[in-house]
Image: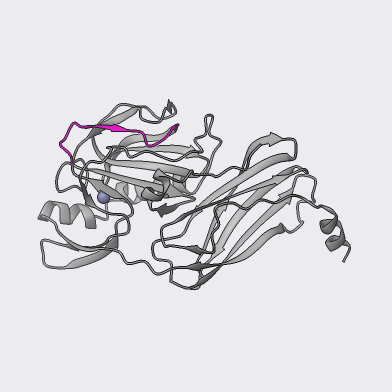
Amino acid sequence: MLAAQSNAARALPVSVLRTPAALMPGDPLSAAVTSAEPLAALDLTVELADGERVSGRGFAVRSGPAGMTWAAVIGIPSTAPAAPARLTISARFAGGAPQEAPRVLHEQSITIAERAFAVEDIPLSAELSNLRRTTDPRRQQESLALRLLLTTSRPVARPHFGPLRLPLGDARRTAGFGDRRRYLYADGSTDTTIHNGVDFGVPAGTAVAAAGGGTVVMARGRMVTGLTVVVEHLPGVYSLYYHLQSLAVQEGRYVAAGETIGAVGSTGLATGPHLHWEVRAAGVAVDPDILMTAPLVDLPGP
Ligand SMILES: [Zn+2]
């Protein structure tokens, strides 16, 4: 009871933004909280009807008269069932005991709506069939390293809060976010997967623009995705660019929105020159088109 009373005494203004009552599979979801008392951590979690939990660690954004504002960004997986889900925002206070349970700041029910995705078949040559199914340790190591990168956040020196821009403008699209894909292997077997990004079919050599400002956290060759660039726009929020012909940036440097990060190619597992572009929030692939008009974090007025 004592713990509950001391918690209750910590009245803090909590603003929760861009959390409509209904969300679609693939929607990004952000929340911002302003606290007069210093926070040590903020967590945004959605528990889906099938029991899957998506969770993101928040980060301090700015201080103002009402205190420090924190934000967190997560994504609703494209596989989320069309059913009610539970959103929770919880925090730890800077002065709290290490064993103290996080305090729930906000809870609400949200409805995940039904969303249909395109279905496509992709025939692969013998060479690409082997690449897609290889058990080469390098591929496994690269897969683990990328997953670790995308689920770990780090401070971003010059964060990008606003909407993103398309890396190739209104170039022709050859595959969409969330497409259900069936790979047809050369030996007649098949494998079904989900396309986590958007593909643009443009000539090799076309300059690719950064979707937003941020830190280049990966710029290197990978077996499956070829020459790859990953930009961190906010802690835990990334845009990814695959199959490039050449790289124009190095790991660790800042890129401005619209700056060229490389040129379109067909390196890695690609059946022709194209850009695969993807946006991830706390590890979950989200529909990039939503972020062309909506900001990554919708901050309250100062
Ligand atoms: Zn793709």
Q: Between 33 and 293, which is closer to the camera in this rendering?
A: 293
| Image quarter (top left, top right, bottom left or bottom right) of the N terminus | bottom right
Q: Could you tell me which residue is drawn at 48 percent across and 38 percent down? A: 162
The magenta region covers: 202-214
Secondary structure that dominates the magenta span:
loop
As drawn, is 198 to the left or to the right of 155?
left
The answer to if 210 sits in the magenta stretch is yes
* Spot occupied by residue 91 in the image (x, y as percentages of width and height): 69, 52
* Spot occupied by residue 110 in the image (x, y as percentages of width and height): 55, 66
* Spot occupied by residue 179 in the image (x, y as percentages of width and height): 28, 60
The answer to if 50 sits in the magenta stretch is no
As drawn, is 267 to the left or to the right of 141?
left
Question: Residue 263 sits in which quadrant?
Answer: top left
Question: Residue 99 sits in which quadrant?
Answer: bottom right
Q: Residue furthest right?
A: 2
Q: Could you tell me which residue is drawn at 76 percent across and 44 percent down? A: 94
